[in-house]
Image (tube, coloured by chain):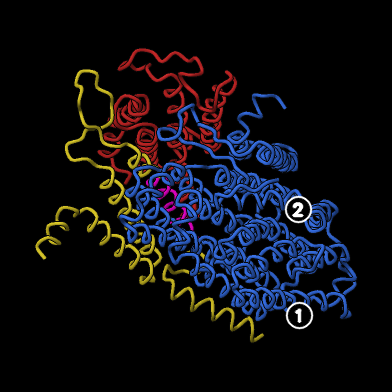
Chain colours: A blue, B red, C yellow
Amino acid sequence: MPVVISENLAVLIVVALLSAGYVMPLLKKIKRFRVAEFFAVFVLGLALSGGLYLAREVLHNGAFTYAVGGWSAPWGIELAVDSVSGLFLITIGLVAAPILLWASVDLVREVGSRARAAWYLTLYLLLVAALSGLAVTGDLFNVYVMVEVATIASCAIVAARSNAVSVEATFKYLMLATIGSGFVLLGIGFLFVLTGNLNMNFIFQELSTSWQNYPTALWVGLSFFMVGFGVKSALFPLHVWLPDAHSSAITPSSAMLSSLAVKGYIIALLKVFYIAVGPEIITNLPITDIMTLLGMLAIVAGALFALAQDELKRRLAFSTVSQVGYIFLGIGLGNIHGLTGTFMHIISHGATKALLFLAAGAIIKQTGKTRISEMAGVGFEMPVTLGVFAVGSLSMIGIPLFSGFVSKWQLLLGSLVNRNFLAVIVLVGGSLLAAAYLLPVLRTAFFERSQDRTVKEVPYVQLVAMLFLAVVIIMVGTFPSFVLQLAKQAAGTLLGLEVLP
Amino acid sequence: MRDFVLKRVVALVLPFVTMLGLYVIFHGHLSPGGSFSGGIITGLSMIAFSLVFGLDRSQEKISERMMTLIESFGALWYGAMGLVGILRGTSFLMNKGAGIPLGEPGKLYSGGLILLITLGVGLKVASTMVTLFVSLMEEEEE
Amino acid sequence: MGEIGSRIIQNYPYVFALALFIIGIYTILTNSNLFKKVIGINIMEGSIYVFFIAAGNIRGGVAPILDMGEPGLVYVNPLPQALMLTGIVVSVSVTAFSLALIMKLYRFYGTVDAREIMRIRSEVRASAGGN
């Protein structure tokens, strides 16, 4: 790779995605709209290869910073590329590209017109750019900007199909997400007032010497972050917007939101809590206990809600609430295994939930049925789709050789190290509940006979997209070394530990 | 709304409002204001035009397609200006360090690339305001 | 009491920001009119602007434009102002977006009242389930 590109790769990924997003409206009049869609997929593929390159670089040579405009830290905006960024960039690339490939088959028909499809691609690329920006940023100013871009873009892709239910869900989502942004901004304000800086490293240095002088103010500021990011990432009692938004949006939007958008805010939360404020302060305040508690509540409550749903997409949406609980439980455990589990779960749940939503969307598109009880015998007509759905389900449950197992194993280790046996019970119980809400779908699809024999498998492009995600899940599950190493190093970065390769 | 006095007054005032907007954009690096405030003023002058003379008249002047073009151009222009620094072997958005002459402090040309960047952002903001207005108006008429 | 009173008077922008924030949140959460919810969002964001600008302000400071003629001027930190300018841009786009959504909702349901919309939806769902 030429030096010009490799040195500026961190900023180039974000800029390339943003620019590609703004090229899309210019392409709406071209003869074959598929060209625009494949161009977008191609740019996402480039972003993935850039992310892989950065991750390898970070693994071998350690973290580095990039001064935008040549202005170094306290004056300018700084990008901090570490293993957290590398891991999340890989997740984004691995998940966003197949979703868009899947969507490209009938995007124009789904959203209504070509102009709308072009804007949809713009918003999709803007969302991906904002999430990549969250991954590489080292500055709270940037965090705020990227969070806002991601919020508006993700609200807008929910409203892509303009019917009453999805517009209403979008409005609800927008209101709650804006309240969340307000809380995040107030939290940034508290950190700025306490330290006089917006750069994460400078806030860390400032706070590590002086936080004991005003613990209450710090505590209030961190609570604002907790609530703000909690609303946006659907932490259990604040999840009310998620089921409506994710089940009423078009399939690529729900896959994107469930698998990536929610995680972006968690990455931002991790950066604020562990890089800006620092692990010592976080573990001294009761904030980790609250996160553990809410995480466990989310695992159980989300799974129970999911069990009660008969609509397939709604069940998957509630399953996201439950799985976000695992991620927060890992953060709350606060040790190296817990955080490794968090990062592994970010990548594993990203791929798994995207796959499940895409498979669900394929079933709904081909059969026109949205309820699980109506899906009798679909497995015989759509064997590949239901096959990858089975892969996703097994990974979600945490069967060995699938990616979900790796993350849950790390979370189990983390809770055992902390001697938190309630968390162990919840983790195992959560897996059983996941089996209880996912396996009936397969049972209905494979072990019940249908009268309808006209259903066909989806086009091969969509099959390729889904098979790609299934392969990712199995590869991460069977050969986790590279990703696990990256996740361990990311956890080490957050805790301020040196993890040897 | 389609009032004679209103039309005359707006026709008289609008050129100056647009001028003010462009002035604020161009002097963003010298005085308070900049691309966002200037872009808003420029965009509002166009919105005022379509409020008084009707949406069709303003669409004749600048079509919606043109607005989309300007909007995309503004965003892409910003990225292109950032790449100048990279292409000259320094970092993204680098200005003086990339060997761009800064000019004399206090004069209009005294910020290197900043003037060009604010111009692009100003165009983007102005066209976005108009697009927002037009899409809300069309929503109502449907 | 006197000390706390004088502290409050000294830091009146923060008290003002807190009051506005609570008013904004209260408006969003309790009003069923969708337009009023959007107004509440704007009030809430306005309170955050007040908070940040007050935090970055120095009494007697001037705008941070380099003036060669007068050394020793106290400049106000431009960082919070830049952040708030971004915040204003964001709030403009959120407001525009939510207004567009409200217009769509009005076309679908013929009302901008959240409770009415809920009622209509549950009626539709009940009639669909009854068939």
Q: Which residue is mark 2?
A: A102
The residue located at (46%, 69%) in the rendering is: C110
Q: Tell me the quadrant of the picture where the N terminus of chain A can be found.
A: top right
* Picture quadrant of residue B40: top left
* Badge 1 or badge 2: first in the primary sequence: 2
In the displayed structure, does residue B43 sit left or right of residue A405?
left
> Chain under label 2?
A
Number of other residues with Cα within 10 Å of mark 1, as a class: few under 14, some 14 to 19, many 20 or more: some
Label 1 secondary element = helix
In the displayed structure, does residue A244 sit left or right of residue A367?
left
Choose between A23 and C128: the one closer to the eye: A23
* Picture quadrant of residue A433: bottom right
The residue located at (58%, 36%) in the rendering is: A64
Q: Which residue is mark 1?
A: A373
In the displayed structure, does residue A363 sit left or right of residue B36?
right
Residue C30: percent from left, percent from top: 36, 72
Q: Tell me the quadrant of the picture where the C terminus of chain A can be found.
A: top right
Magenta stretch? C87-105
Number of other residues with Cα within 10 Å of mark 2, as a class: few under 14, some 14 to 19, many 20 or more: many
What residue type is disc 1 on? Answer: Ser
